[in-house]
Image (cartoon, helix red, strand yellow):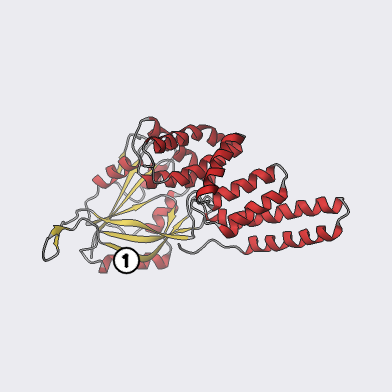
Amino acid sequence: MISVSLCMIVKNESCVLDRCLTSYSGLFDEIIIVDTGSTDNTIEIASKYTDKIFTYQWKDDFADARNYSFSKASCDYIFTADADEVLDESNRQAFLELKSMLLPEIDIVQMKYVNVSDFNTVYNSKKELRPKLFKRLRTFLWVNPIHETVRLSPVVYDSDIEILHMPVKSHNKRDFHTFINAFNKNIPLDSYVIVMFCKESWISGKKEDYQTLLPVFLQYIEQYNQENGGLSCYKEINCCLARMHRILGNKDSFFKIALKETALEPSSEICLELGNYYMDNKDYEEAVLWFINAYSETKPILDIHAGGDEPLKALSECYKKMSREKHSNGDYALAGTYDNLSRQYKVQAESWKLPEEI
């Protein structure tokens, strides 16, 4: 049986840490807690489960903190966890079975992250595979009988273990701060990180956030232009820029981006934003056109809701308002037609469900 170190970085997690560590208790050969500056009783709670508690000076860098926690591990494998996770009894048993049968050539084990909270900032399905268990010391092997080379790609095993992600609050403000700080320090970020940040800003950002985030996204687009298309997440950033400009009232900038995107390969997000613009301006017939495009003619690239229940809800609301207008003008037949359409789209929106997995 393999030995496993549980490594966590925490800060002010007193409301969820006990729940997490109770669900994980008995599964690990050592528990390592790295505290990044708690001012509540997080350390006191952690001390009930382990004496391997370390203080880390926060640097606005989650990777550095994770690396520090990994440096304290001594077992065969390292399991990384967040304080808002929970493992139920059936998956505890599955974890124990995994420990007893894991083959030594496996470098990484992925587990299903199950989103059961309203505080979603990046997820487009109820479940997604995430790398959770890592071999601490990786052995490099030569492969291929001729033109041999060292195997560089890790051997990954996709398990059926499900980890419940149950946050009790949103961490988007913290994430926004960390991203902006990295930008201000000129720290290079991989494209997948920028895409994740686009998702988070699209799903959970507010007007006050956009006032701060807008210059950052504009700088990334400028980088794209300077590199002649070197930024792979150009369309994702443009989606966020379109939403920011619309909400902040920058009409010309909004249409400059939205029309360029529709001329190329429009996404559900761009069509949704055009629909929202016309709906805000009470041009409901034009809004309907764009909401239909968001739902049935395009695909989402950031938020699956942008091509699902969001345009359906908006269509229902548009037809409701159009019905009222026709009713007040005495056009009762058309008002009735719009009423029926409003109800139909409302039913569709209510029956729409987030995919189990993508």
Q: Quadrant of the C terminus?
A: bottom left
Counting every numbered tag in the picture gives 1
Q: Residue furthest right?
A: 330
Provide the residue designation for mark 1.
Answer: 96
Q: Is residue 247 visible?
A: yes
**Looking at the picture, which amino acid does disc 1 mark?**
Leu
Task: Identify the residue shown where x is 20% and y is 55%.
Answer: 152
Q: Residue furthest front?
A: 263
For the residue pair 214 and 201, the one nearer the viewer reads as 214
Q: Is residue 239 left or right of residue 26?
A: right
Q: Is residue 235 left or right of residue 274?
A: left
Task: Identify the residue shown where x is 37% and y is 45%.
Answer: 191
Task: Identify the residue shown where x is 37% and y is 61%.
Answer: 111
**Quarter residue 280 falls in:** top right
For the residue pair 236 and 129, the one nearer the viewer reads as 236
**SS class, disc 1:** helix
Residue 213 position, x and y percent, is: 49, 35
For the residue pair 80 and 183, the one nearer the viewer reads as 183
Q: Is residue 102 left or right of residue 168?
A: left
Residue 11 position, x and y percent, is: 41, 41
Residue 24 position, x and y percent, is: 37, 58
> Crowding at label 1, few (<14), some or many (≥20) Cα neighbours within 10 Å?
some
Task: Identify the residue shown where x is 48% and y is 52%.
Answer: 301
Q: Quadrant of the N terminus?
A: bottom left
> In the displayed structure, would residue 168 be above or below residue 108?
above
**Quarter residue 106 falls in:** bottom left
Residue 31 position, x and y percent, is: 30, 51
For the residue pair 66 and 40, the one nearer the viewer reads as 66
